[in-house]
Amino acid sequence: MANPYSKHRIRKITRRFGLRPLRSGTVASFYKENAIIQVQTKTGTYAVKPFFRNTLLRSSTLNQMKSTADNIELLINSGFSYMPKWLTTRSGKLWTLHHGRPFYMTEWIKGRNLETTEDYEELGRALATLHMIPSGHLDTKGPSPVNKSNYGKSKIASFVHEWKKLSISMRGTAIGTKNTESTVSALPIKPGLI
């Protein structure tokens, strides 16, 4: 499949985020050939990502992008640090529209496989932290319904044990990206999942 992202198009999109690309190229995932555009600039390497509508939801692409951006802002404002930094456009939004398609940019994160117990413990901490963030739709003035002490070492150890069993049983299964040098990033968060 031909690359649908010309250098001119990539330059126009990145300039909306205040950056000038020096080099760019697409990176495939297991699910999509041109899933991510890797952009190198003077200030660093970034991921430009087209946003595609989830067809299982009845809302439009723009409404889904707005909802995703709202959820990302909730995570940012909650201090959630287990995701790449999202860039803002010159107008202050987390995304831009180009030729009818929403795009967003994040810092590029060099991915790698989970290999050690510490990797799995860190994954457990990230998931626990994510699940302790109150939804923007809930009353956040009262005490959190989650007892943070429930995420102690025994819970993490249990999680690590189960995750290792799962990863061993899934060896050779297509998980992640074809290129382990590609970005490991926050997935678009569907409304109501936080």
Image (cartoon, rainbow, N blue to C red):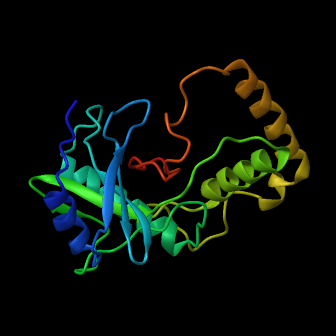
* Position of residue 40 measured from the top left corner of the image (x, y, whole percent): 38, 65
* Position of residue 44 measured from the top left corner of the image (x, y, whole percent): 45, 72
Closer-to-camera residue (188/149): 188
Q: Quadrant of residue 105?
A: bottom left
Q: Is residue 66 visible?
A: no
Q: Quadrant of residue 34?
A: top left
* Position of residue 135 measured from the top left corner of the image (x, y, whole percent): 50, 60
Q: Which residue is at a point 62% across and 20% down the rendered structure image? A: 172
- In this image, 155 relative to 185: left or right? right
* Position of residue 141 measured from the top left corner of the image (x, y, whole percent): 57, 74
Q: Residue furthest left?
A: 99
Q: Which residue is at a point 54% across and 60% down the rendered structure image? A: 83
Q: Residue furthest right?
A: 154
Where does the N terminus fall, quadrant-wise? Answer: top left
Q: Which residue is at a point 58% across and 73% down the rendered structure image? A: 79
- In this image, 145 relative to 61: left or right? right
User: Does residue 171 sit above or below 84 in this rendering?
Assistant: above
User: Does residue 45 sit above or below 152 in this rendering?
Assistant: below
User: Does residue 27 sit above or below 39 in this rendering?
Assistant: above
User: Does residue 39 sit above or below 177 in this rendering?
Assistant: below
Closer-to-camera residue (167/113): 113
Q: Which residue is at a point 61% across and 56% down the rendered structure image? A: 130
Closer-to-camera residue (67/181): 181
Q: Is residue 75 visible?
A: yes
